[in-house]
Every structure is written in structure tokens, then in C-alpha cells.
Image (cartoon, coloured by chain):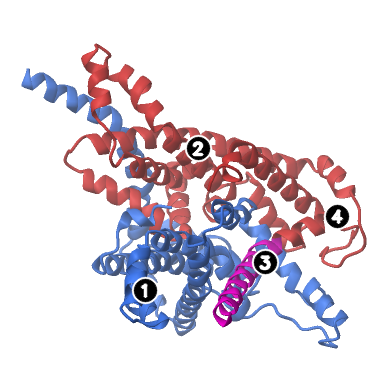
């Protein structure tokens, strides 16, 4: 009897879990291992990947022009995360604690823009900000400026575009953390004589820090890879690590070098996720 | 008196701030909708030349654009179905049983969630190149299924906490088999979570740019068509199609989620 249930359970486990295991092994584990191996390979004169153990790609990663882009990319990702927190926190706080009956609608309104393809929305910003675009036209009509200003193609616009693309990934975890706040704690704090700022820094901020942490992970890491934002709004003047990788797999056609560049992103991701877990971050809250 | 005034001011500031953030979120969409009515015919289609409905008619002559949209829907439907089936089985199986290697599966599921999309894109590209899986609709479906599965699993898993096993036990005590219990008890109970996961998978698929960009071969999805046209200026018929898609999805959500706007108190 015991044998039978054990055997039954084994069959159930096999039928339910083996599809996901096989799928993730074949489409996640193997390709990533292959990329790791490829980063130690070379290419022949026809740009084909040739298996020979070399550290050449890693040596090239230390090229000064690359180092400059890593720094720039990390700066862009950092600024993006900082702006998402600064702009997003008060906003998430206001919609999460509103007593209005429209709360669910306010929340939905954060998601709705993301049903329109992100590329075309970024292009919408480019149209709006360009020299002959609507913002310039508007400012000229208002007599605030008399010559067209080119807002585009610098680190600032790239950060702006990244903030725009990644904003909901900060808002959603913040919203969840703030919504869970116990109102009694805030009242107790003010009853005991704490001022607004004190309540915020000693009660609210520590209790919602988990939301800030998971939001930061979900914003910082993708910002290192969003090459199309840097392309469309940065115009090649504010490349991120993603642009370097993209070039090696498209026009540059040096896959092993691209693989080595990807290893940097994998490394940064692992490091940040470890740090996140050390700070008590829960992997589940990164889900959506 | 002063106090209520102060509170009113605070509230006003709050409302104003939220309005600014919503303006930030919706402004590019307003630009897209406006430009879909732009009568301009010269690249890069950025200056306003008057109002016209022409692009909504011309849109239906642009077969390459319509094809790309068709591909997007086809890929989204196929990958959503695959990811939902695999993900539902996985979520329930992993919740119900303890077994060796569970931690490894979990770790594999987290990878697509945290890793930059470009890394997953190039990794899948190298896999498809090495295994000679033809790059096109098939590789896109496989790639989209891969990044959707974890979101389906996590969505269902969140709902499973506090799930009552006794209903399933009752079903089996009454003589239903495991398979029958799964389809007639477990799946209906989890239907909202499964639906939510499927919706998420569908949304991720139709919006995906980066992973598709590396795994598409010659096949164009709608986002890739947009990307291709960006260099020369996105023509207003692309804006027109985007406007129609947005109108469609919004309508769908209003119809299905009408409780969002009414019942909630």
C-alpha cells in the first residue's frame, strides 16, 4: 500500500513537473551555459564561432572605450532607479492610501499605458521632444523660447526614457508594500508625539523598504540592457551595456565577444540578487 | 480654520502631483493618437499638417504591417497556451509535492524574471543557431513561452498559499481519479489565477521587443516592424494601428472588468 502511494506520487510528480523541468533546462540552462562557454571561444575569418580556449574576449572587455560605457551604463541605471524611487514613492503612497472609491481605477491607469508597445511610446517621446516637435512648438507659441531647443540625444533623455519604461516596475512593489502599512502604527507614532518627518523615517520608510528594494532590482538590472531606449532617445551618445552586446550579435558579428559582454550583465545580476537576498528580500515579490 | 485650509492645500498638492505623473505616463500615447490623424506625408512625419482619417484607410493596404500584426497575435496565442499549460501543471505539482531538485527548478524559473532580456535573447539565439531550429514563428513561440512560464507559475503560486487540499481529497474519496480531480476540482478553483497568468503571458508576448529582436530570423512581429521603421520615421499608419490596438484592449478590459469601475468601495 505504501509502495503504491509512493509510486502514484512519483508518477504525479513526473507528469506535472517534468514539462517545466525539461523546458527550462533546454531553453534556459543550456543556452546560458553555452553563452558562458562561447565567451571563451574565438571566431574564424568568416565570423563563425570556433572552439578554442582563449581569454582574448575577456582581455578586450578591459578596453578603455568599453570601460567608459560600463561606467556610463551603471550611472544611467543608477539615475533611473533614483528617479523612479523619488518620483514613484510619493505617487505610490498617494494612490495606495487614498480613501477614494476610484482606487482600483487609479491603479489600472498606471498599467494601461503599457498595453501600447513600449517602442512606439518611446518614439512618441522622441516626436514630442524633437527640435520640430510639439514641445518646441508649444514653448515658441508661449514666447518662452525663440529658437528651437534640441532636447534629444544626451544621457538626460536616455535616463528620462528609461524612467518612463521602467516606472511601473517600481510603482507596483511600492504600492503593495505601502498598502500593507498598518494605519494604527502611524497613529500610535503621532500620538506618542512624533512629527511627520520622524514618523516617516522611523516607521513608514523601514516598513516599506522591501518595496523599494524589489522595485530597485526590477528597475536597475533591465536599465543596463535596454539598448533601444539609448538608441531612440540617446542617439548613440549614451550607450548602455546592452548596446555593446547588441552590436556584437548584429552588425559586429563577433558572438564570442558579445557572449563575454553578456557575462558582465549575468555577473551584475547575480551580485545584486545575492545582495537583495542578504537584505532579506523575498524572491517571490520580484514575480510581477 | 487654518487646519482645514492646510489639509485642503495638502490634498490639492497630492492631486496635482498625481495628475502630473499620469500626464507623464499618458503623454506619449496622446502623441501617438494625435499623429495617427496627421495629414503629413513627408518623413519623418513629425510636423503637424492638419487632420485626416486617411491613415486608418491606408492601414488596410499596408499588408506588411497587417501581416506583422497577425504574426504578433499568432505568436502570443500559441505561447500563452503553451506557457499556461506548462506553468499550471508546474505550480500545482511544486506546491503539492516535495522532491529532489525542486530548488533547481525554482532557480531556473527566477532567471528569466531577473536577468536582462538581452541576455536571454542572445542565449536563445545561440541555441537556435546551434540546434538549427528554424528562426521564424516557431523560434519566436518557443522564446516567448520560455519567458512567460515563470510569470504564470508565480501568479498561480501566489494564489495557492492557503489552498485547501481537503477538497481534492474529498473528490478522490468519492472515487474520482487524479486526472479527473485535477481537471474538475483543481483547475476550476484556480481559474482566476490561471486566467491572470495567461493574461500576463499574452501581454508580455505582444509587447516583447528585445527577445524577439534576436530570435526572429526574417519574421516580423508588430514591435519589430515599428523598430524597423524608426530609422526613417514611423509613419502615421503605424500610429493608427497602435491606436486601434489600444482602443481594442481598453474596451475589452472595460467589458470584462466592469466591476473595477463600479462595485469597489
Neighbourhood count class around disc 2 (C-alpha, 10 Å): few under 14, some 14–19, many 20 upward: many
Which of the two discs, 4 and 3, labels the residue nearer the N terminus?
Answer: 3
Residue in front for this viewpoint, B218 or B27: B27
User: Is A4 on the left or on the right of A105, as rendered?
Assistant: left
Q: To which residue does mark 4 refer?
A: B37
Q: Are marks 1 and 3 in contact (CB under 8 Å)?
A: no
Which chain contains the residue that carries disc 4?
B
Q: Position of residue A31 (x, y in %)?
A: 37, 50
Q: Nearer the viewer, mark 1 or mark 3?
A: 1
Q: Is residue A60 placed above or below A282 in the rendered structure?
A: below
Which of the two discs, 2 and 4, labels the residue nearer the N terminus?
Answer: 4
Residue located at (91% from left, 53% from top): B52
Q: Are marks 1 and 4 on the same chain?
A: no
Residue in front for this viewpoint, B204 or A30: B204
Q: Is residue A85 placed above or below A166 in the rendered structure?
A: below
Residue located at (39% from left, 62% from top): A177
Distance CA(mark 2)–CA(mark 3): 34 Å
| Local SS, label 2 | helix
| Chain B as rendered: colour | red
Q: State the extent of the magenta-drawn residues as a range.
A: B1-28
Q: To which residue does mark 3 refer?
A: B23
Residue A126, quarter of the rendered image: bottom right
Q: To which residue does mark 1 refer?
A: A205
Residue in front for this viewpoint, A64 or B240: B240
Chain depicted in blue: A
Q: Position of residue A122 (x, y in %)?
A: 65, 64
Distance CA(mark 2)–CA(mark 4): 34 Å
Which chain contains the residue that carries disc 2?
B
Neighbourhood count class around disc 1 (C-alpha, 10 Å): few under 14, some 14–19, many 20 upward: some
Amino acid at each position: 500500500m505504501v509502495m503504491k502511494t509512493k509510486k502514484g506520487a512519483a508518477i504525479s510528480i513526473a507528469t506535472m513537473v517534468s514539462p517545466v523541468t525539461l523546458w527550462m533546462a533546454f531553453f534556459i540552462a543550456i543556452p546560458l551555459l553555452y553563452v558562458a562557454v562561447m565567451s571563451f571561444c574565438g571566431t574564424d575569418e568568416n565570423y563563425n564561432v570556433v572552439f578554442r580556449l582563449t581569454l582574448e574576449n575577456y582581455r578586450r572587455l578591459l578596453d578603455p572605450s568599453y570601460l567608459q560605457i560600463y561606467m556610463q551604463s551603471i550611472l544611467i541605471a543608477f539615475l533611473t532607479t533614483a528617479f523612479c524611487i523619488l518620483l514613484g514613492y510619493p505617487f505610490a503612497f498617494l494612490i495606495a492610501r487614498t480613501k477614494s472609491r476610484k482606487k482600483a481605477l487609479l491603479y489600472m491607469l498606471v498599467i494601461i499605458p503599457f498595453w501600447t508597445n513600449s517602442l512606439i511610446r518611446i518614439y512618441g517621446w522622441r516626436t514630442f521632444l524633437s527640435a520640430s516637435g510639439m514641445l518646441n512648438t508649444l514653448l515658441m507659441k508661449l514666447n518662452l523660447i525663440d529658437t528651437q531647443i534640441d532636447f534629444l540625444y544626451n544621457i538626460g533623455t536616455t535616463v528620462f526614457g528609461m524612467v518612463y519604461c521602467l516606472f511601473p516596475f517600481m510603482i507596483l512593489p511600492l504600492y503593495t508594500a505601502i498598502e500593507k502599512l498598518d494605519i494604527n502604527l502611524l497613529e500610535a507614532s503621532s500620538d506618542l508625539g512624533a512629527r511627520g518627518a520622524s514618523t516617516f523615517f522611523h516607521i513608514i520608510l523601514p516598513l516599506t523598504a522591501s518595496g523599494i528594494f524589489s522595485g530597485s532590482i526590477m528597475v536597475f538590472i533591465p536599465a543596463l540592457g535596454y539598448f533601444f531606449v539609448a538608441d531612440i532617445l540617446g542617439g548613440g551618445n549614451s550607450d548602455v551595456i546592452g548596446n555593446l552586446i547588441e552590436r556584437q550579435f548584429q552588425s559586429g558579428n563577433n558572438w564570442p565577444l558579445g557572449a563575454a559582454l553578456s557575462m558582465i550583465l549575468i555577473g551584475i545580476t547575480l551580485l545584486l540578487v545575492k545582495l537583495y537576498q542578504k537584505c532579506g528580500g523575498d524572491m517571490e515579490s520580484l514575480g510581477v | 480654520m487654518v487646519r482645514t485650509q492646510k489639509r485642503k492645500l495638502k490634498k490639492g498638492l497630492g492631486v496635482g502631483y498625481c495628475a502630473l505623473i499620469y500626464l507623464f505616463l499618458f503623454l506619449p500615447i496622446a502623441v501617438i493618437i494625435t499623429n495617427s490623424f496627421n495629414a503629413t506625408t513627408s518623413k519623418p512625419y513629425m510636423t503637424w499638417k492638419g487632420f485626416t482619417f486617411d491613415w486608418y484607410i491606408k492601414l488596410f493596404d499596408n499588408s506588411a504591417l497587417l501581416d506583422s500584426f497577425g504574426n504578433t497575435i499568432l505568436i502570443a496565442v500559441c505561447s500563452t497556451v503553451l506557457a499556461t499549460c506548462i506553468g499550471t501543471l508546474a505550480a500545482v505539482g511544486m506546491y503539492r509535492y516535495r522532491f529532489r531538485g525542486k530548488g533547481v527548478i525554482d532557480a531556473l524559473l527566477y532567471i528569466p524574471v531577473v536577468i536582462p532580456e538581452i541576455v536571454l535573447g542572445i542565449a536563445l539565439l545561440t541555441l537556435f543557431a546551434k540546434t538549427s531550429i528554424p528562426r521564424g514563428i516557431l523560434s519566436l513561440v518557443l522564446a516567448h513561452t520560455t519567458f512567460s512560464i515563470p510569470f504564470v507559475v508565480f501568479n498561480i503560486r501566489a494564489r495557492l498559499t492557503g489552498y485547501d487540499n481537503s477538497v481534492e481529497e474529498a473528490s478522490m474519496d468519492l472515487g474520482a481519479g487524479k486526472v479527473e480531480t485535477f481537471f474538475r476540482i483543481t483547475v476550476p478553483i484556480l481559474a482566476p489565477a490561471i486566467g491572470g497568468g495567461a493574461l500576463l503571458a499574452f501581454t508580455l508576448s505582444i509587447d516583447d521587443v528585445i527577445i524577439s529582436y534576436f530570435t526572429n530570423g526574417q519574421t516580423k512581429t508588430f514591435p519589430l516592424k515599428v523598430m524597423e521603421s524608426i530609422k526613417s520615421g514611423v509613419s502615421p499608419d503605424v500610429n493608427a494601428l497602435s491606436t486601434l490596438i489600444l482602443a481594442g484592449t481598453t474596451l475589452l478590459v472595460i467589458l470584462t472588468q466592469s466591476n473595477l469601475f463600479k462595485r469597489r468601495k
